[in-house]
Image (tube, rainbow, N blue to C red):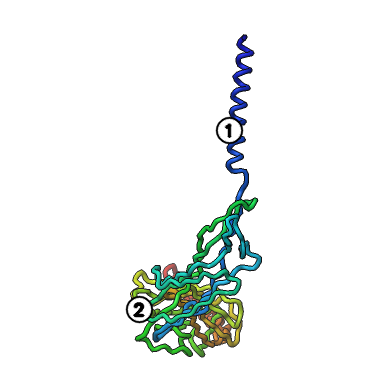
Amino acid sequence: MNKRSLALVTLLIITAGAGTFIARLGAANPYGTIKYMDPPIITINSPLGNEAFSSLPVSLEFTITKREQAMWITNWTTTGGEVLKNKLSHASIVIDGEVYRTVQADNDLSSPFSFQMNLTNLENGIHNLTIIAFCDGVEIETHGSWARYIPYNASSAPILFTVSTNAQFDYSQFEGLPYDPPIVTVAFPSQDATYIVPDVPINVTVQIRGWIYGNIERIRWLNYSLDGQTAMPITLIQPPDLTSPYYVYGNDVLAGLSNGNHTLTVRGETFIGGLTCYFNETVSFKVDTSFAPTTGTFPATLVFGVSVGIAVVAIGLSVYFKKFHRDKNP
């Protein structure tokens, strides 16, 4: 057998071996699988975001539902006779990163799963609440020869709420905030002032006093609106030390104002933890440029009188020098 024939035979043997390996591999796993693992919808009905509580307990309510048109197996019987279906196994109530309680469910979510309880042993402060749903998904071989459960989970959006059992809230004035709101003062333009120039400065001071369990209130934005027009941002100057209370200053210029009455409204927002506070202050003022001093000329009579005086002095000096010259040269 020559070298060419030997090489051809060797190639055929290798190809046959590879084909046998591929055939066996295909026989071992001829089909794929489908996984049914759609996450459910978790809705926290109570407490609401940024809600504040002056006493305990805090009512907790949440609902877990199946998504519409979800890939969700409700009844699958395996070859061994076992019935599999997607279901909610249990749910964990997580507060501030720790499991507060685990609730057993074993619910296929053919109808919504709802749960309610009172949260009693909460410390004063801002709390972060999350609900985690632990589900049993189903993985099925595409030809139905086998199926099995696959665990997975889904989380709700976090909810921030505040507990302060020692605070007295004035809900009508402070919108439920458990701290003193900021104090805004408009120094310029001042209330009922009249300005004789068309360019009027804006000078605003905001005293910020909020502090809750180590969280310092901060200002998010400050703007102004002149005569109900579009709001404009105000340049902020903040101190390096934000120890409560501290002051934030805003400055700008109202340029080219027309004569007449004007109204300036200053608005802003502060935040502390998950809480926000909106504040505003309005002043009314007037611009009247008719009182402004104008650049004028000297009166004509004064100019004429000065001119005549200069002329008389000049004539007198001329006569004097002529006489002095004659006397010196007879």
Instruction: Say if 263 sits above or below 323 in the image.
Output: below
- Residue 46 percent coordinates (x, y): 49, 80
Which corner quadrant holds the C terminus?
Answer: bottom left
Q: Residue at x 57, y 80 (%)?
A: 226
Residue 317 coordinates in the image, percent (x, y): 47, 75
Residue found 62% across the figure and 9% down from its top: 2
- Circle 2 packing at 10 Å, graded few (<14), some (14-19), many (20+), is few
Instruction: Look at the image and tell me whether residue 180 can be seen.
Output: no
Considering only vertical position in the picture, is 117 above or below 81?
below
Q: How many marks?
A: 2
Report the residue that reaches farthest toward the front: 80
Asked where in the image residue 237 lies, by quadrant, the reply is bottom left
Looking at the image, which is closer to me, 249 or 307? 249
* Residue type (three-letter) at the residue carrying disc 2: Glu
Q: Position of residue 24 (x, y in %)?
A: 59, 36
Please report whichever mark, 1 or 2, sits nearer to the chain's N-terminal start.
Answer: 1
Is residue 168 something one can see in this rendering? yes
Q: Is residue 167 left or right of residue 195?
A: left
**Which residue carries the number 1 mark?**
21
Residue lying at 50% horizontally and 67% vertically, measured from the top left: 89
Q: Position of residue 29 (x, y in %)?
A: 59, 43
Discs 1/2, front: 1
Q: Secondary structure at mark 1?
A: helix
- Which residue bears the numbered disc 2? 123
How far apart marks 1 and 2 lie (CA) works out to: 66 Å
Identify the element where label 2 is drawn.
loop
Residue 119 or residue 294, whichever sits in front: 119
Q: Quadrant of residue 73?
A: bottom right
Q: Give the amino acid at mark 1.
A: Phe
Q: Is residue 263 left or right of residue 119?
A: right
